[in-house]
Amino acid sequence: MIFIKLLLITILTIIFLLITLSSRFRTYQRLFIIFGYGLLTFFILFPSIADKVAEIFGIERGSDLVVYIAIAILALLSVVLYAQVKIHERAITKIVRDIAIMKSRKCE
Amino acid sequence: MSDVAIVIPLYNEEKVIRQTLEELRQKRPDDVIIVVDDGSKDNSYFEACIPGVYLLRHIVNLGQGAALQTGIDYAKKLGCKYVVTFDSDGQHCADDIEGFIEVLRKDEADIVLCSRFLGKAENIPTLKKYFLRIAAIVERFLTGIKLTDVHNGFRAINVAKFPDFVITQNRMSHASEIIDLIKRLDMRYVEKPCTIRYSNYSLAKGQSMMNSINIIIEFILGKAIK
């Protein structure tokens, strides 16, 4: 049990660090990620509490709740990342377009 | 200088671009011709350098939608009122342009779109024909604009009247975005027949039909995330 817990927390921490260090997020996004990370770690460490919380939501096992939350967070994250890619794409487009217009020429 | 600009997005068409441009130059000697090379990997950029042509180049490939918008921006900078978008692979006929511009000049519409189904489509493959029909129905469902041919690169737009006509979808879903713009900006639109020449070359190069699924997804996501 301990080994599985440690493994899960290690994987979670690596993913958390990769996400927060490699991307530029807004404060509320960062808070959301930290909250998600904290919650998942807490549930991994204390599965009995997770069971109780799960019961409130009408879910049988705490581990199911963890999976549901993880999926929700990942889905949200991918949407945020997609939006950021779009923002970058727009910036690149503007730069490339401006260069194209600046360097335009009339063939003789 | 004419107030008509012909904008041609260009990507890897070194074999046909010169011929397309020479025909255009000959048939539309007064119009401004703007070629936007979208980061071609072949010799297209140099092949497109024909006397009188304005040549622009994207340093990286952005997509046809982005190339069109760059051309439209440049046309506005040159003071052109009307923009005709034209494909680089020689499938459109320069003879059709006059009829399109005529509609805009008479102020009968703000945008004229070419429909291969109203006109003469030479050698159109049966599968492609039905696929484009379905695309038109999907588009009608998504935007409420009734068109018979939605993914045709030949259009004439009154850009002077609509400064907000800006294409933001860089890749192929710009065609759907244009229809969306027609609705949003309340533009008067008309479809006119035009001739499409399906040569072996353009058939081999053209859009794969599987790609249209990507286009729909791109369009819907693009609408969701502004």
Image: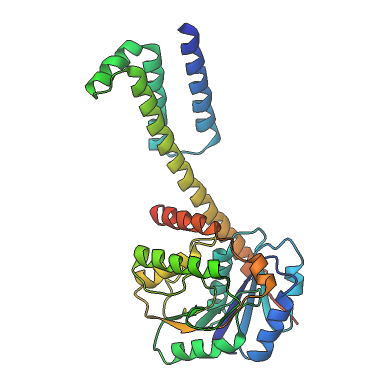
Colouring method of the image: rainbow
Would residue A81 appear left or right of B35 to someone viewing this image? left
Would residue B106 appear left or right of B3 to someone viewing this image? left
- Residue B7, position in %: x, y? 59, 76
Above-or-below relation of A29 to B21: above
Residue A104 can be seen in this image: no
Residue B48 can be seen in this image: yes
- Residue B133, position in %: x, y? 45, 69
Q: Quadrant of the N terminus of chain B?
A: bottom right
Q: In the displayed image of the protein, which residue is found farthest to the top?
A: A2
Q: Residue at x 55, y 56 (%)?
A: B210
- Residue A73, position in %: x, y? 40, 32
Q: In the displayed image of the protein, which residue is found farthest to the front?
A: B126
Which residue occupies the foreground of this view, B211 or B87? B211
Q: Residue at x 61, y 76 (%)?
A: B123
Q: Residue at x 54, y 83 (%)?
A: B120
Which residue occupies the foreground of this view, B49 or A102? B49
Which residue occupies the foreground of this view, B57 or A46? A46
Above-or-below relation of A3 to B105: above
Residue A18's image quarter? top right
Total number of numbered discs in the rendering: 0
Q: Quadrant of the C terminus of chain B?
A: bottom left
Would residue B160 appear left or right of B198 to someone viewing this image? left
- Residue B129, position in %: x, y? 51, 70
